[in-house]
Amino acid sequence: MVLPLPLVPLPASAIVGEGRMPVTESMRVIGDSPAAIQLMDAVAHRTGIRLTTTDVAEPGAITLRVESGAAPTEGYRLSIGENLQIVGGDEAGLFYGVQTLVQLLTEESGVWSLPRVEIVDAPRFPRRGVMLDVTRHFFDVAEVKRFIDETSALKYNHLHLHLSDDQGWRIQIDSWPKLTELSSASAADGDRGGFYTKDEYREIVAYAAARHMIVIPEIDLPGHTHAIGVAYPDLVEEPVLNDALVSQAKELGQPLPVKGEPYLGWGVGHSSVRIHEERTYEFVRDVIRELVELTPGPYIHIGGDESLGTPQADFDLFAERATAIVVEEGKIPVAWHEMGSAAGIAEGTVGQYWGMTTPSETHAAEAARFVERGGALIVSAADAAYLDMKYTPDFPLGLTWAAVVDVQRAYSWDPVAVLDVPDSAILGIEAPLWSETTRTYADVEQLVFPRAAALAEVAWSPQEGEGRDWESFRGRIASLAPGWRARGVNFHASPEIDWASPEIDWASPEIDWASPEIDGVEQ
Ligand code: ACM
């Protein structure tokens, strides 16, 4: 098969011309956008070629500019002919044009070059999210930045950080200092925990913003709250043990939750804050107020999933009060779809659907409630978009409760076909990485890549159209491997993909052949 353009996600339209443009140190970059610096850094990192800037138009220069109206929101036009020009409809569009350009760079016999091409591109969905669970295992600021680098390069634009769960509390809250003093040190399996100070968290938010990613902080309530009770026992109920939790703990050899002691297992559904205590809502308001101060983006996620130990009427009461608090503090609430059980959930709340691609009636009705209340939906169908599912039944990392999700399965679904709501109610997708089994950041990368690339195409590229199919994707995704290897990304070389296709320059000296974690590739 002839390799089409080595791009993931597939652009909305591309016309390929004859010949190639060599990339050399003598090329100048014109443009004062931050994207110009990002382009020069990325080219230097990928090729070793150090481009410089100029103010003067000259033949063969790379021009970067923003022109409102030249492309839709987040869209861009990339033209490589005699000259090279990227025009963004906005700064984000320019940034995405730069990501496309970097993917187009290829090397042959020591010469780096670009194809002559005209690309006009813009995203299918405004919401292209990834989630990192930093509670079951903790990932430090440098690791989160790496996650942002690699996902923003795939044109993701939201980073949801799951900051609290039964196993730990991960963000400094000044008004409730024991949360980090007493509930942050441990993680699942007795591994090391951690938390972000406010300055560290601001650093993450700023780093993401520079790459056009909005950070959505999540405090998971009213369940998934065992860690809150380690710091403040009066805020939570006694653990409620369900049969599944008890049998899973036995099977995995994990401890059961004990109130006031750090919880090191993986079980869910046993914890709840006290719904009928006013102090609970003082806590919720304080935490949300402090998160709002750290959050330039419009959203605060308040969880709502798997509150199995909370009676339904109590859960619904909590959902109504907690979403109202987020609105009163000036943000748009986001909640897992279960909160759609509450008739009075705050208007405009965004639901995050995490059921299957074929929903149960209950899940579908809960998701639809958000739309009835003037909100919208993010689709995180667990049997397609969950990055913590195993690729194969015997894959060493990940879980299987939703499905075994190989790369083709992650690629082959349509977010608007899952729920019976108007297409306009679907903001887009989010691909969550839950971290029960990922004890290191290298483990995270194994599960995330290449599936995050498959899901990026689901979120960005038109559903119909030439090249938007698995066979084309298989060819294009392989061409991302040299860049991932050059940057040390520990992706899973799934045997579904012909990573050693002849179009890929396997002899590149930047490839870290010694990496022992890269499996499935002939080295
Ligand atoms: C979830 O997977 N509990 C949202």
Image: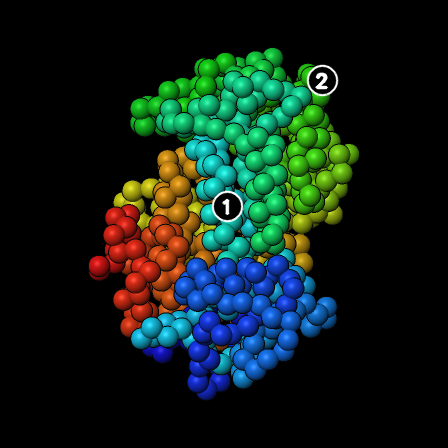
* Quadrant of residue 77 within the rendered picture: bottom right
Name the residue at 57% across, 42% down: 204
The secondary element bearing badge 1 is classed as helix
Q: How many residues crowd around disc 2 within 10 Å: few (fewer than 14), some, or many (20 or more)?
A: few
Which quadrant of the structure image shows residue 494? Answer: bottom left
Quarter of the rendering occupied by the C terminus: bottom left
The image shows residue 469 at horizontal and vertical percentages of 44, 69
Amino acid at circle 1: Lys
Instruction: Look at mark 1 in the image and give the residue it sits on.
Output: 145
Above or below residue 247? Residue 46 is below
Residue 249, image x and y in percent?
36, 24
Residue 111 vs residue 238: left or right?
left
Within 8 Å of ligand 1, the CB of disc 2? no
Whole-Å distance between the Cαs marked 1 and 2? 38 Å
Q: In what element is the residue under mark 2? A: helix
Q: Residue at x 53, y 70 (%)?
A: 11
At label 2, the amino acid type is Glu
Asked whether residue 510 is in view, the answer is yes
Disc 2 target residue: 278
Residue 220 in view, yes or no: no
Can you give x and y, in whole percent of width and height, for residue 74 in the image?
A: 64, 62
Residue at the image point whose x is 50% and y is 39% from the top: 141
Q: Position of residue 394 (x, y in %)?
A: 27, 45
